Each structure stands twice: as structure tokens, then as C-alpha cells.
Image (cartoon, grey):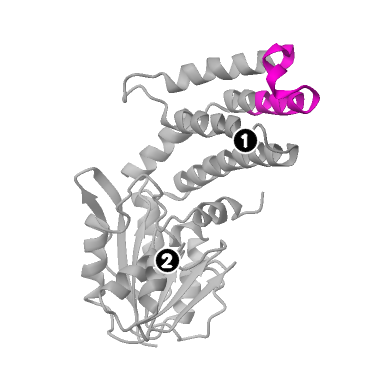
Amino acid sequence: MKKQDHWTAFWKQGHTTTFGDFFKEGYRGAIGQWLVDQQAQWPKTGTLLDIGCGNCGLLTGLLTSNSRLDYIGLDPAEIAINEHASSFLMTRSNNVSLVTGRGAEETGLAGDAVDVAVSVFGFEYSDTNAAAEELARVLKPRAPFSFLLHHSDSVVTRMSGRALAEYQEEDVKAVVAALHTISERAERVALADLKNDTAAEVARLQLNDLASRYLGQRSPDDTNVTMFEFMTSALRFFQIVKQPLQERLAFISDLQMEYDHYCARFRQMISVAADETAVHQLLEHFVKLGFEVKAPQALMDERGLLAWEISGRKLAG
């Protein structure tokens, strides 16, 4: 798996925030208000750099607020501008460009080219010290930055940990093997005779057992959401079982890859989430590079802790 394959696959599903389905309202609520508050302190014109932009969820907010800032979206994954933002751009004069396949450590931008840098759960996925040094190079003197970073004790980090804990690798492998067996036997016997084929019937019964285990959970508190979604996806195989072999094999391969990517994303989310010590060390590095910074703050909403807020400004050279 290439380093960013799991994020490329995620963004291609059309998500506009790193939360995916965890927070369907995206960058609204507390995060949306944070963006509004930060935007009030940014220059009215110039160039904004969105670090780890994904499908440009932040761009949508800028356009709906009638911002005149030009926009550069930077992401190491393969990304695209979301449909909502694209529709706004048809009637706006903002210059918008994407830099894909590049991280925050080496943007490829000219020095002193950026008037404001922002990142909503993106900067921390980089080598943050190297990315801070690159930011010092591309920001104009007195240009501000505003970042939200994953917090090691946030709601998202805890939910990511739960998702990984719920992932039952051996059962996933068993489901994939059973689907392969049924697909293979469907090539050898008529579909009407599959129920009389010993190997296919054993595989079907195994799938039924796992489906009963994960889809039959009655209490929401006891439901293994990860495996519930996996089994729901896996059973869609029977909607295409009459299709040619290559289509069946592609379905099984995509199912396996989807959940490999699922785990990779959550592992990375947890690994980059910062505790208080790490945040202060990062801000100390910014100061050494010639920035003035504000004390970090914890962003909260009714669900609990969401993120670290950090911000600052490059001092005049």
C-alpha cells in the first residue's frame, strides 16, 4: 500500500472532512465557529494555503462567507474540489489551485508567497518540525497561521480507538475466504445447484453465522459498528453473484481493500494526535523559527474535547 492510498481512497468516496461519518455536519458547529473567529483575523485579500485540504471542505466555507482570498489546497493524497465548492466557483473570481502528492514539508511554493496558512486536522500528519520550517519559508512577514490539531484525548481519537478495537481481523479474513469459495464454486456448478454444493454450503453457513453475530446485536451500546458495517457490505455480494467472475472478484478485492484502508486511517489518526507536551514542543519550534505564537487552547463542544487550537504569526524579517 502506498503511503497515502488509504486517504486517497477516503477522499474519493466524496467526504469533505477527515471525520467522514463521525461528524456528518462537517466543519460546522464548534469547528465552523472557530473558522469564523479565525477568519476575522486574516487579511481580506491575498493567498490562503490550506494544509492537508482533503476535498477542500474549508474552501466551501470561505466561498459561502464571500471571502476574496485566493486559495491553494495542499495534500499528499489525490484529492479534488468538492461539488459544493465547485458550484460556488462558477460565480466567483477567487483563484483556486490544488497541489496534490505533496506534503507540508515541501510545498513547492515560492518563498514569501502566502498571506495566511490554515489547517483543519492536516498539519499534524506531516513531519511537523520540517513542516514548520517550510511554513516559515513560504509565509510572508507578519502572515498568520491558524491550525486545529488532533488531540490525544479528543472525541475523534477515542472513537478511532474504538473503531480499531472493534475490527475483528480473523472474522474479516473468514468472510473474504467464504466469498471466494462461493464465487469459485459458482464457476463450477449452476447457481441453482449451489445450495447442494458442499463447499459453497459450508461457506454460506459460515457467513450466516457471522452475520447473525454482528447484525443481530439488539442494543446500540453493544453493537460492534465496525463489523456491522463490514458484514452489511459483504452480504451485498449476493446481489452480484450472478455476474461474471471478474466482477465478483473485483467486489471481494474492493471489500478487503476498503477495510484495510479503514484501519490504516484510524491508526494514523491516533498516531498523530498530540498531547500537551507535544503541542508545547511544536510551538517552541515555531518560536525558534521566528514566529510569535499564542498559548494552545482546547476546542470543545457538547460532545466533549475536539481538538487543539494553535495559532501565531511570522515575525517581520
Q: Residue at x 42, y 81 (%)?
A: 139
On the question of residue 288 being in view, the answer is no
Q: Amino acid at mark 2?
A: Glu
Label of residue 83 in the image: 2
> Foreground residue, 122 or 57?
57
As measured in the structure, the alpha-carbon distance from the residue carrying label 2 to the one carrying label 1 is 30 Å
Relative to 236, 299 lies left or right: left
Tell me which numbered mark, 2 or 1, is placed earlier along the sequence: 2
Q: Main secondary structure of the magenta part?
A: helix
Figure quadrant of the C terminus = bottom left
At which x and y percent is residue 248?
68, 37
> Foreground residue, 214 or 83?
83
Q: Residue at x 59, y 40 (%)?
A: 260
Q: In the image, is residue 55 above or below residue 144?
A: above
Query: Which residues fall within the magenta stretch?
Result: 176-199
Does residue 10 show up magenta in the picture? no
Q: In the image, is residue 193 above or below residue 68?
A: above
Dot 1: within a 10 Å radius of its alpha carbon, few (fewer than 14), some, or many (20 or more) residues?
Answer: few
Label of residue 240 in the image: 1
Q: Amino acid at mark 1?
A: Ile
Does residue 197 show up magenta in the picture? yes
Q: Secondary structure at mark 2?
A: helix
On the question of residue 84 being in view, the answer is yes
Q: In the image, is residue 15 above or below residue 198?
A: below
2 or 1: mark nearer the eye: 1
